[in-house]
Image (spheres, helix red, strand yellow):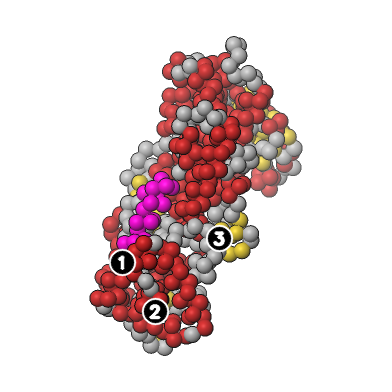
């Protein structure tokens, strides 16, 4: 909640005779769509029944009684009470705060609570594709956003390093594998084997049965199966680590599914002690009210399933991190699985099951078609990054051929373009992959926001601006464009809070686009460097905008070059 909302809520509460609390008023306050309607608006419809008056009459009565201290004016417009902020006071307060705090602006103090974030989690022995990008960048952005509001994020890469697919891969390797070829080019060769064996399994059910048998051997500690699994895992991690370095993403835990193999017996024991286990067609299950199917804990052949390991993982994470929240950034097709997971934990009487949240997201498609590793229809991330950097470099060469560190800037722009494009989309919507659109310097893209930031740094450098030189001044700006920027800067803390509350990094990305657009509009109409009474205020506005753009990009895991 901003100070101005507090001020408006207090002014209204003072004349409403307890008809609504200050908190209720704050929740009802709106931001008008048109600036000529003011900066805050209070709809009075909810008071009509209590006060037994027409809404427009209530608004007129309230305006007559309200003290306007802190506002330029308060007016009634139909059924709304519209507040116009004191522009000079607000501008001075916001700019002074950012000039003083820098990138710490809108940062909350550490609260001592942890947020566990299950993110990325690619499958071993498969290439890292665009399909894995969403979980990685959404999870990383949420980690930064929660850190900004006082939590300590714990980034967990729950690697897909266990399951029947490894039985399938072992069958493929033993039938078609070439050790020398795999050692020379591990991931692409393993992918070929995986695609080939799945195509064969679609025609021959005995292949699937053989895969189940090999996975059961793996679970039972068969030496050959374990050796092959370990080899596939080690080779995969080399590639994954290289890609994570390119993306600038790190993890606090790389404990995958296999880590929980020796922790599942305890889960089954607890379920048994609580008398929650039953048998259905030879399988061990937990019956769940309101679900079409029970939670399958063990198959009839004794093999465990995802939910068994996820139950063990949930217990381990609560004990290890004592999380206030535990987020699972996993595709929306797994929604049913996580509903069952929470339901089982709830039946186990763990009250912290309410702190577990599935953060689903939509699919990335190409030309409207779903991508599938199993069918060999994938967009590999590493060559995509290379191409994005190449395209960014070409645009930088055209715009600024004398730039000193072109390679580093091109990398920041190319990688940032891919990440930003993903994150600007509301996560449930998904998007169609279009690299040309991603790396464009025009439109609602990462490079557009980065370029706005770089332009600001150029202005500040030309002016030799130092924030400490203007501290203590009163800032007054006369144009509408600067006021739009001030209102956006003021809203930054609310934007971050909303992104955290809704697990939605796109809120920050869209805010960054809006702020960059507002500044570019201001820049087009205002001679910032021109000598005038407003020069210090204009430069301070540019500085504050640059700070918040840089911080917005950082929350999304995107660099903000000072030159482009």
Q: Residues within 10 Å of mark 3 (few under 14, many from 20)?
A: many
Q: Is residue 244 magenta?
A: yes
**Judging from the image, what secondary structure is the residue with disc 1 in?**
helix
Q: Main secondary structure of the magenta part?
A: helix
Q: Which mark is residue 363?
A: 3
Q: Nearer the viewer, residue 14 or 115?
A: 115
- N-term mark: 3 or 1: 1
Q: Is residue 30 left or right of residue 116?
A: right
| Local secondary structure at mark 2 | helix
Cα–Cα span, label 3 and label 1: 30 Å
Residue at x 43% of width, y 57% of height: 120
Q: Which residue is mark 1?
A: 231
Q: Is residue 145 left or right of residue 76?
A: left
Q: Is 120 or 415 nearer to us in this picture?
A: 415
User: Which stretch did the figure color magenta?
Assistant: 234-250
Where residue 560 appears, x then y in whole percent? 48, 35
Q: Residue at x 32, y 55 (%)?
A: 253
| Distance Cα–Cα, label 1 vs label 2 | 17 Å
Q: Secondary structure at mark 3?
A: loop
Tell me how far mark 2 sits from mark 3, CA to CA: 33 Å
Report if residue 482 is visible in the image: yes
Closer to us: mark 1 or mark 2? 2
* Badge 2 or badge 3: first in the primary sequence: 2
Q: Nearer the viewer, residue 378 or 524?
A: 378
Instruction: Look at 50% across and 29% down and name the residue there.
Output: 403
Task: Tell me the number on the disc at residue 175.
Answer: 2
**Can the viewer see residue 84?**
no
Precedes in sequence: disc 1 or disc 2:
2
């Amino acid at each position: 909640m901003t100070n101005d909302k507090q001020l408006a809520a207090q002014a209204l509460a003072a004349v409403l005779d307890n008809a609504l609390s200050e908190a209720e008023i704050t929740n009802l306050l709106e931001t008008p769509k048109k600036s000529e309607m003011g900066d805050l608006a209070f709809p009075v419809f909810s008071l009509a029944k209590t006060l037994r008056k027409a809404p427009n009459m209530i608004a007129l009565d309230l305006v007559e009684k309200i003290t306007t201290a802190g506002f330029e004016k308060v007016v009634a417009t139909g059924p709304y009470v519209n507040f116009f902020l004191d522009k000079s006071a607000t501008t001075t307060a916001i700019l002074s705060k950012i000039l003083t705090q820098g990138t710490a602006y809108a940062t909350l103090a550490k609260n001592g609570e942890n947020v566990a974030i299950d993110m990325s989690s690619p499958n071993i022995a498969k290439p890292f594709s665009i399909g894995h990008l969403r979980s990685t960048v959404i999870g990383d952005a949420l980690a930064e956003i929660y850190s900004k509001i006082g939590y300590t994020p714990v980034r967990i890469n729950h690697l897909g390093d266990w399951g029947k697919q490894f039985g399938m891969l072992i069958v493929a390797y033993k039938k078609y594998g070439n050790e020398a070829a795999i050692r020379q080019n591990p991931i692409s060769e393993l992918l070929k084997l995986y695609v080939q064996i799945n195509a064969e399994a679609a025609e021959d059910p005995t292949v699937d049965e053989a895969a189940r048998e090999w996975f059961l051997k793996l679970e039972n500690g068969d030496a050959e199966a374990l050796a092959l699994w370990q080899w596939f895992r080690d080779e995969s991690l080399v590639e994954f680590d290289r890609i994570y370095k390119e993306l600038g993403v790190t993890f606090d835990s790389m404990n995958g599914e296999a880590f929980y193999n020796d922790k599942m017996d305890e889960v089954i024991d607890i379920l048994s002690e609580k008398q929650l286990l039953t048998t259905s067609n030879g399988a061990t299950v937990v019956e769940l009210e309101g679900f079409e199917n029970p939670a399958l804990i063990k198959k009839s052949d004794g093999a465990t399933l995802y939910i068994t390991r996820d139950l063990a993982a949930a217990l381990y994470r609560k004990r290890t991190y004592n999380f206030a929240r535990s987020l699972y950034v996993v595709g929306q097709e797994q929604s049913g699985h996580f509903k069952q997971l929470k339901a089982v934990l709830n039946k186990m009487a763990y009250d912290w099951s309410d702190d577990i949240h599935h953060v689903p997201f939509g699919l990335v498609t190409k030309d409207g078609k779903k991508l599938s590793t199993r069918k060999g229809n994938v967009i590999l991330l590493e060559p995509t990054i290379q191409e994005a950097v190449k395209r960014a470099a070409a645009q930088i060469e055209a715009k600024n051929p004398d730039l000193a560190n072109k390679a580093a800037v091109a990398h920041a722009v190319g990688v940032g373009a891919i990440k930003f494009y993903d994150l600007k989309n509301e996560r449930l919507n998904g998007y169609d992959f279009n690299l040309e659109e991603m790396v464009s310097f025009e439109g609602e893209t990462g490079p557009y926001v980065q370029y706005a930031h770089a332009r600001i740094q150029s202005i500040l450098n030309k002016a030799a601006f130092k924030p400490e030189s203007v501290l203590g001044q009163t800032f007054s700006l006369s144009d509408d464009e600067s006021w739009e920027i001030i209102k956006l800067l003021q809203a930054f803390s609310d934007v971050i809070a909303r992104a955290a509350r809704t697990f939605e990094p796109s809120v920050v990305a869209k805010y960054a686009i809006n702020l960059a657009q507002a500044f570019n509009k201001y820049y087009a109409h205002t001679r910032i460097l021109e000598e005038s009474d407003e020069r210090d205020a204009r430069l301070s506005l540019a500085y504050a905008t640059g700070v918040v753009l840089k911080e917005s990009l950082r929350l999304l895991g995107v660099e903000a070059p000072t030159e482009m």
